[in-house]
Amino acid sequence: MSDHIQKTIDDAMSELRKHEAAAIATKKLINHLCSFAKREPMFTDVDLDPSPGAVGQIKVQKNSFYGRPLATCIREYLEIRKKSGGVKEAMLNEIISALREGSFDLSQITTNEQDQPRSVSISLAKNPAFRRLPSGDWGLEDWYETKPKRGRPSKTGENGSSDAREEGSAVTSEVAECKSSLEDAGVNKE
């Protein structure tokens, strides 16, 4: 997803949170007026508190991520999501929004604002504590029973040696022997 689309999504989520907060404030005002007029409140407490599973409703405390390591902040955010009872995995844009909401300084990763989502994604991919699901969502590795294969396949020689230097020196000595044999036979002398 391009960076400008990501920024637009983040801005729209922020705007959504503002509208939801304004609606709750209006409901509280109406309930207060009802109380003043000695009427029953029109909105219940459930209506005044956003549900934990609703879009954009997982609240991160302001400044809770300030000055802290990226992986720690993301791990805590994912744990909050898990405890909320909703979907525990998060899309990259949700993670970045939560980091910003918690005052994480994304300029620690890169000063270019457009590269920040990509840099966070790279950091997540390199950290074995996190797993990217086929849907593109991110979760914690220990949430899943099956472990994906990470890293490159091991380089073992025919003799089972895993030391690349041993393998390389064995090949070099074989080449030297062949070269010596050819020179002794008078083939391709330089």
Image (cartoon, rainbow, N blue to C red):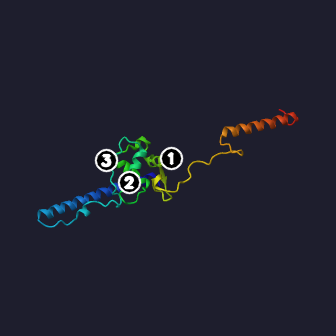
Q: Amino acid at mark 2?
A: Asp
Query: Residue 13 versus residue 140: which sits nearer the camera?
Result: 140
Query: Residue 97 versus residue 50: which sits nearer the camera?
Result: 50
- Determine the image quadrant of residue 105: top left
Instruction: Residue 57: give x, y in percent of width and height.
Output: 33, 57
> From mark 1 to mark 2, how far is it between C-alphas?
24 Å
Residue at disc 1, secondary structure:
helix
Query: Which residue is tagged 3?
Result: 62
Q: Amino acid at mark 3?
A: Lys
Q: Residue at x 86, y 37 (%)?
A: 187
Is residue 91 among the parts visible in the rendering? Answer: yes
> From mark 3 to mark 1, how far is it between C-alphas?
27 Å
Q: Is residue 130 left or right of residue 49?
A: right
Q: Is residue 180 left or right of residue 37?
A: right
Q: Residues within 10 Å of mark 2 (few under 14, many from 20)?
A: some
- Determine the image quadrant of residue 81: bottom left
Instruction: Residue 176: give x, y in percent of width and height.
Output: 78, 35
Q: Is residue 185 left or right of residue 137?
A: right
Is residue 188 among the parts visible in the rendering? Answer: no
Query: Which residue is tagged 2?
Result: 10
Of tags 1 and 2, which is closer to the observer? 1
Of tags 3 and 2, which is closer to the observer? 3
Q: Earlier in the sequence, mark 1 or mark 2?
A: 2
Instruction: Residue 130: give x, y in percent of width and height.
Output: 47, 50
Residue at disc 3, secondary structure:
loop
Query: Which residue is tagged 1?
Result: 126
Q: Earlier in the sequence, mark 3 or mark 2?
A: 2
Residue at disc 2, secondary structure:
helix
Quarter in which the C terminus is drawn: top right
Q: Earlier in the sequence, mark 3 or mark 1?
A: 3
